[in-house]
Amino acid sequence: MPDPALAPHFLRTRRGRALIYQALALCALVAAGWFLWHNTAENLAARQIRSGFGFMRQPAGFDIGETLFAYSSRDTYLRAFAIGVANTLRVALLGIVLATVLGTLVGIGRLSRNLLVRGLCTAYVEVMRNIPLIIQLFAWYLVITELLPAATEPLRIGPYVFLSKSGLQFPFPDLSGGWTLAVPEVGVFGITGGAAATPLEPPPVAAPKGAAAMIGAKSTGGETRAAIGAAP
């Protein structure tokens, strides 16, 4: 039986043994990962299933309604993915700014000496905190779809800012044609131009002309808007 005194010094310490155990666990994890990768690659090859990201260079074949830069269905999946990331970042940045401003104002309001302001801010925090987000989403959806007016007769909140069942329309920089400001306008068939923040039906592109255009407008009425962006 080997003499424990002959073992290296670090093996006789708790720190040394812990390092050895961690190294063994890391080797086992790497071996398990390699086995899974090798087994998956063999099964895919046996079934002649292609893998990888080569498809990202192929044409996407679909359009995207909200874009910050030029895109068509002939562009690649990689460009479509980049546009999706850009749209996500745009919505996230807008949400961060609005949430920061609202949270700061409500937080300051809770410290106010005015009883009414402090009570309203406290009630807002407690109500929003204790109601699940999915219920809040359904409630706002019901308000938008049932209580707000149609896009042909929207509520005017400010200069070129409209609120209707189609959502909130407001001026927005148009980068596709240079540094210009796209302004929403109320037409016979809804609001066109500017930007729209809405999960509902987007406003029509332009006023239809003729029966054929009327049919086309109805066929696109069921599309949904998934992000905040420039309206067509």
Image: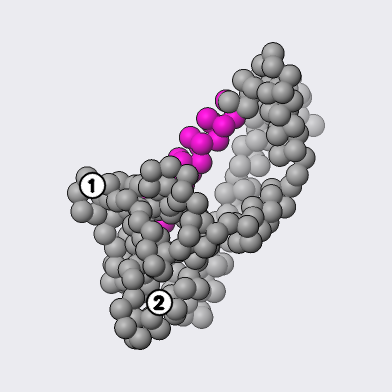
**Mark 2 closeness class: few <14, some 14–19, many ≥20 residues within 10 Å:** some
Residue 39 falls in image quadrant:
bottom right
The residue at the point 74 percent across, 25 percent down is 119
Q: Is residue 78 visible from the viewing direction of this image?
A: no
Q: Pointer 2: what residue?
A: 217
In front here: 154 or 73? 154
Q: Which residues are magenta?
A: 84-104
Indicate the quadrant containing the C terminus: top left, top right, bottom left or bottom right: bottom left
- Which residue is rendered at x = 63% and y = 57% of the image? 147
User: Image height check: is 197 above or below 106?
Assistant: below
Looking at the image, the residue that sits furthest to the right is 1
Residue 124 image point, x, y percent: 70, 34
Whether the magenta-drawn stretch holds residue 193 is answered as no
Give above or below for 231 relative to 116.
below
Q: Position of residue 90 (x, y in %)?
A: 42, 46
Q: Residue at (59%, 30%) from the top-left corner?
A: 103
- Report the magenta stretch's main SS: helix
Q: Residue at x 55, y 35 (%)?
A: 99
> Hey, what amino acid is under mark 2?
Ala
Q: Nearer the viewer, residue 145 or 100?
A: 145
Give the amino acid at mark 1.
Answer: Thr
Sequence-wise first label, 2 or 1: 1
Question: Where 229 falls versus 209 (above or below)?
Answer: above
Specify whether residue 202 is in view. yes
Q: Which residue is mark 1?
A: 180
